[in-house]
Image (cartoon, grey):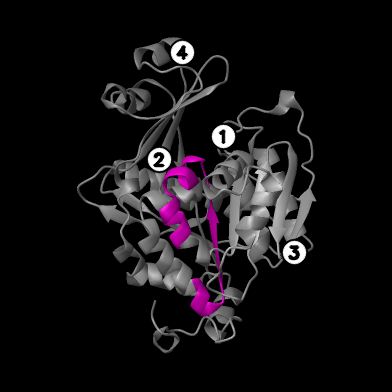
Amino acid sequence: TKPRSQVAPVYFLANGIMGPDHCARTSHGGSIKLLGVGNPLLDMSANVPGEMLAKYHVTSGDVILAEEKHMGIYDELPASYAIEWIAGGATQNSMRVAAWMLSKEDASCAAQTNVVAYSGCVGADAHAAKLKECAEAAKVTTAYQIDEATPTGLCACLIDDSNERTLITRLDAADNFKKAHLETAAVQDLLAQAQVIYSAGFFLTSGGPDCTKLLGEHCVTYGKRYCLNLSAPFIPMFFVDALDATMPYVDILFGNETEAAALGEKKGWGTDVAAVALKAAALPKASGAHARIVVFTQGASATIVATENAVTTYPVPPVPKADIVDTNGAGDSMVGGFLARLIAGDPIAKCVDAGHWAAATIIKRSGCTMPDACAYEG
């Protein structure tokens, strides 16, 4: 990270508050406040008959990485079915939800546009162009790394007659992010503007700790917040070294109850979600600017928030089972709603409330998609 004296313009002052250039940009509605860095995937979603699943040797509800026998599906789906294209990948999903939440104007917060950005690695192909189109239609500014030799990552989302979703993912370029891209002028400009930076835990498998350290050190230097999601049980179980290298920089840690249990088991803390949250909150931290906050969701059960030796629980408003269409985007949506209110300056209780509302809205739809207008009232 560059010394403060070499960062121009002056977006932040030494004590971490907004500098004159950032404030000037904000007054014109053009300042990026939230930056996500992760593994981008172009989701191709379609309603398909059961024979399609049998043809590609998958079972309804599978969530798998593509093998050679699945590769034909990425050409067959758009050729034979009506496709809904979505700018996906966990981090990018959260950024789209945050941008959508921030587009809502209400008594406590004016509508904000062009304040969310995202970076990840894509190929030099038509799918990358479609991904950029979808992200920017969702009011997310993109700064993709282009891998000339590898195709853009794709996720085939097969919706069968039972309304179950089967996900077949090929990571390709999404897995090839390089630290050097974070050092480019385009991304450095976004970093200088952003108040909060977020990555899903999957980024630990691609960009890795070299990238999270750069992002984290930037946040330490400028008094910003770096946020990370555990994302899946295999991250704390099998990428624990990368997680341990990143945790000193993490100001807000997200996860769900199964991921928390996996972390607790790996660390020898037990599997009680609240106890794991307290242990994670108390881990050493590189910056004293913000006490670490740990946010663990538990599906329909209360969300646990731990910080400074205290645990607070927030009940989740019930959603009728008949209204639930697809829970796959619940976690990403919760983070997006939370971060939207965080950068608006709201207290944690309201951030959690917004996260709950966003998740409840998205699980009533297929995929991580949002209605045209955000109706959040706070």
Residue range of the region highlighted in magenta in the rendering:
219-245
* Location of mark 3 (residue): 347
- Between the C-alphas of marks 4 and 3, the distance is 47 Å
Across and down, in percent, residue 135 comes to 46, 49
Please tell me whether mark 1 or mark 4 is closer to you in this view.
1
Please tell me whether mark 2 or mark 1 is closer to you in this view.
1
**Of callouts 2 and 4, the N-terminal one:** 2
* Location of mark 1 (residue): 328
Label 2 is placed on what type of residue? Answer: Leu
Is residue 106 placed above or below 74 in the rendered structure? below
Number of other residues with Cα within 10 Å of mark 2, as a class: few under 14, some 14 to 19, many 20 or more: many
Label 4 is placed on what type of residue? Answer: Pro
Depth check: give the residue in front, 301 or 320: 301
Label 1 is placed on what type of residue? Answer: Asn
**Of callouts 4 and 3, the N-terminal one:** 4
In magenta stretch: residue 311? no
**Of callouts 2 and 1, the N-terminal one:** 2
